[in-house]
Image (spheres, rainbow, N blue to C red):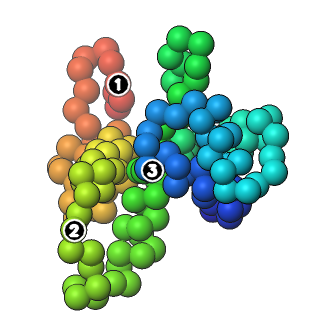
Amino acid sequence: MFKALADSTRRLLLDALFERDGRSLGELDAVVAAHGIDMTRFAVAKHLRVLEAAGLVSSRKQGREKLHYLNPVPIQAIHERWIGRFLSDDQQPRRITEREVIAASLLDLKSRLEGDLPQHTRTPEQSQTPQNQPTQEGHGHEQ
């Protein structure tokens, strides 16, 4: 993901999607051109593929166009892991946007579903190893 964020053109594309989600390749190509960057449409499409591979952008076909959407969850994960822990209470942002709330909620849901919760926050069911879990007769671990 950091490699995808390292390129200024890809950051420009993310900024454009932050301003307005659901943009087509043509619209994003126009944004790049408006910033004085001399780039072919094919190169813009390649940058979008890199962002998609990093999980920062998702796309969906609508009719003949492919629309691109910002996925803020990976960026929120970086913020929570690397930036948020270093901010003191008086440096914390005061205004939280709806997008941040949604991204934080999705990140929490992802962590819970993938079992990435710290041990002290796991439920007893999540803490059991497969050997300790009860089984039905004929299924699972029989000893």
**Numbered disc 2: secondary structure:** loop
| Count of numbered circles on the image | 3
**Which residue is at the front of the view, 39 or 53?**
39
Residue type highlighted by circle 1: Gly
- Looking at this view, name the residue that lies furthest to the left: 124
**Mark positioned earlier in the residue sequence (3 or 1):** 3
In space, the residues marked 3 and 1 are separated at their CA atoms by 47 Å
**Which residue is at the front of the view, 81 or 124?**
81
**Numbered disc 1: secondary structure:** loop
Q: Read off the residue under disc 3.
A: 18
Frontmost of labels 1 and 2 is 2
Residue type highlighted by circle 2: Arg
The image shows residue 36 at horizontal and vertical percentages of: 73, 56
Q: Which quadrant does the C terminus fall into?
A: top left
The image shows residue 40 at horizontal and vertical percentages of: 82, 40
| Above or below, comparing residue 71 to residue 142 in the picture | below
Q: Is residue 86 rendered to the left or right of residue 101?
A: right
Q: Read off the residue under disc 2.
A: 95
